[in-house]
Amino acid sequence: MSYTITEKIFNKHVKGEKVKAGDFVYAKVDLALGNDVTAPIAIDQFKKLGAKKVFDRKKIVLVPDHFTPAKDIKSAAQAKLMREFSQEQHIRHYYEVGRMGIEHALLPELGLIEPGKLIIGADSHTCTYGALAAFATGVGSTDLAACWATGYCWFRVPATIKFVYTGKMKKWVCGKDLILYTIGKIGVDGALYKAMEFTGPVIKKLPVEERLTMANMAIEAGGKSGIIEPDEITYEYVREVILRQDVPLRKKTEMSLRACRERWDELKSDKDAVYEARMEINASDIEPQVALPHLPSNTVSVSKLKNMPVDQVVIGSCTNGRISDLRVAAKILKGKKVHPRVRCLIFPATQAIYLQAIKEGLVEIFVNANAVVSTPTCGPCLGGHMGILAKGERAIATTNRNFVGRMGHPESEVYLSSPAVAAASAVTGKITHPDAV
């Protein structure tokens, strides 16, 4: 039989007969993630189950990133509960403030994500890891608790929609624009409970960081996951990340490019695999995109927005807080000033990214431009802290959602864009094409 990459991953994680899209399965999980919002609920459910010990202390990841550094007493208590559970269960991958980052940027950076893994997280943007050819998806806190106890989780194997990107990307267009354009075409439920498989010559040239952005926003189209077949770019990224860690010599030997090919090349959809649908997108037609309130699917080309003033610019998040995103923002902001009517907030996604931005002089550029640089945190993305909008205010952000009240007051507005558009808008005080600054 023929299989998609998603079906192949599930077949490596279930016992018995081969499974296909639509089958209900009980699958072994390689990594189970929680944060300071969702993990406390899972901890409570774990204890109600009567469980005493997690299935594998090395396969659980806990990251306090949503309301940390703690914004109030309640958030401090949430983080404390997770910290104490980590100590009690001897969780290897617990990352405290100062060592942490925004979870979906942190895990790939630490080498915890590899092709072919099956990963769940009590956070909808867990689908980010599909950029590295893993099947990764968000689950509820109760399912997370059950997985902590058993090492397994139930799924309905999703059917796959294949998105083929052809053509040539224009100047300033990046992965964020590709995914915003795609969501604009199919809608916020256009891939409901489907695996979104991104492929084609454009994707094959796309850097991993931009692939991560695309997979991150699969959920905004209703997708169960986003996934990209592994290739030389994947192997080189995974190899370099793992070799940066303190790993034994045996592991380093396993990480040769040849070994990566031999291990993961089979993780590709068969030519005659069955897809739910196929959609071809010509990237040559795509200009920098902006998603208008109040849906990520409400997209237009930035050039169509004239004299749209903004009060706040947010550059960062698990979607666009990586070092390449900060470099783009710095390129535009260098030697310029943020418009005096605008607040520009920049969030490096991890401590390592923050440090790299310092070493490269990016932080100095941001500060000289009158932007504010924050410690890694989800912060304003979910309306948590560090940049809440008041009634009537408008923000343009490199985040992933712009629902009503997402970043603060229900009568505020959030527009989504790439780092280039966001940085240009910070300079002019209105939503602006990067070529205009």
Image (spheres, rainbow, N blue to C red):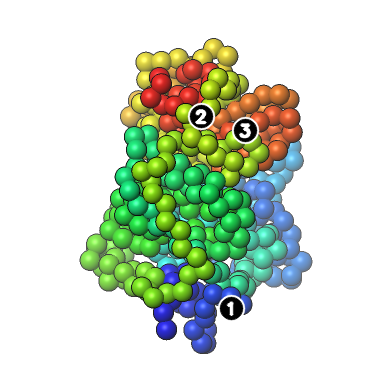
Quarter of the image with the C terminus is top left
Residue that mark 3 sits on: 414
Which image quarter: residue 254? bottom left
Front position in the image: 369 or 228: 228
Callout in the foreground (1, 2): 2
Q: Are marks 1 and 3 in contact (CB under 8 Å)?
A: no
Callout in the foreground (2, 3): 2
Q: Separation of disc 2 and disc 3 at Cα?
A: 17 Å
On the image, the x and y values in percent for residue 131 come to: 43, 56
Residue that mark 2 sits on: 304
On the image, the x and y values in percent for residue 305 come to: 53, 27
Front position in the image: 4 or 333: 4
Q: Is residue 89 left or right of residue 426?
A: right
On the image, the x and y values in percent for residue 95 come to: 53, 48
Label 2: how many Cα within 10 Å (few below 14, some 14–19, many 20+)? few
Q: Which mark is residue 174?
A: none
Quarter of the image with the N terminus is bottom left
Q: In the rendered structure, which amino acid carries the disc numbered 1?
A: Asp
Q: In the rendered structure, which amino acid carries the disc numbered 2?
A: Lys
- Residue at left offset 60%, top offset 28%: 395
Q: Is residue 340 above or below residue 158?
A: above
- Residue at left offset 66%, top offset 69%: 146
- Residue at left offset 56%, top offset 69%: 158
Q: Secondary structure at mark 2?
A: helix
